Image (cartoon, rainbow, N blue to C red):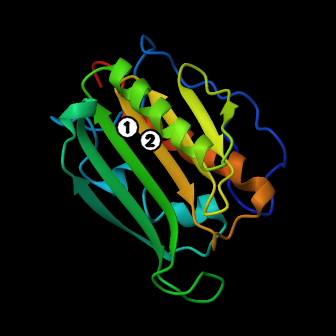
Amino acid sequence: MLLSACSSSLPSGTPPIPTFPGPGAAPATSAPPPRNSILPTDCDQVLPSDQVPNYLGLPLGTVRVTDLRDVPAPSVGRLERVTCNYTSLGGPGAPPSNTLILKVLTSGYTTPEAASAQSRVNRDAQASSGVPAQPVPFGAAEAVFYPDPEGPVLVVVYGRVTASFTLTPDRPIPEDQAQPVLVDLALRALPVLVPQAGS
């Protein structure tokens, strides 16, 4: 069911409906290690930097990741926020060195309602700037795609976690393939961001 993220074989158009498990589903067989925080503390756990080139059709060994932990925002119920910046190391077939190619912004909230409410605020802000929201079927999660000229974005809300996946304008992915690529990335990351109970 997962989409291939190689640029040479990606289908165009709307991707098929993913089958992301519901909150009561059995734990995945390759469950992430237990943690005390809502979000992973290491971005390489979210999307491994050595695998991101495969997902984006880049040469192996051409991507690195850095993470930035932000302060809580109690007024909106946000307890944690981590930004993962995936940048190019350069080389043949890759964007110039230090080019940001993928940004993953994850947030953990006090309740699922707080996560959904903040997602709606952000959606309204995008709409007011002229970027339309395109709902994407995403199993038990809620997902919206924004064809932003500054870089296409997929925002996913699942439980207490929100995650946005952004491809930069200099991305190696054609515009008509951005949505399925972002869906594929989200499908890979969410089981780590929202591990099932007992995992």
Across and down, in percent, residue 65 comes to 38, 67
- The residue depicted at 46 percent of the width and 34 percent of the height is 121
Foreground: disc 1 or disc 2: 2
Residue located 63% across and 69% down the image: 169
| Helix, strand or loop status at disc 2 | strand
Where residue 73 sits, quadrant-wise, is: top left
10 Å crowding of disc 2: few (<14), some (14-19), many (20+): many
Instruction: Name above or below for residue 23 compared with residue 136.
Output: above
Question: Which residue is at the front of the view, 114 or 187?
Answer: 114
Q: Secondary structure at mark 1?
A: helix
Q: CA distance from mark 1 to mark 2?
A: 9 Å
For disc 1, the marked residue is 193
Please give left or right for residue 150 compared with residue 44 in the image. Answer: right
Amino acid marked by disc 2: Ala
**Which of 60 and 129 lies nearest the eye of the viewer?**
129
Find residue 163 and name its label: 2
- The front one of 55 and 172 is 172
Q: Quadrant of the N terminus?
A: top right
Residue at point 61% right, 41% down? 127
Image height check: is 96 above or below 32? below
47, above or below 49, in the image: above
Residue type at mark 1?
Leu
Q: Position of residue 149 (x, y in %)?
A: 67, 61
Q: Are marks 1 and 2 in contact (CB under 8 Å)?
A: yes
Residue 168 spot, x, y in % from top left: 58, 66
Residue 78 spot, x, y in % from top left: 26, 35
Judged left or right of residue 51, residue 2 is: right
Residue extending farthest to the front is 128
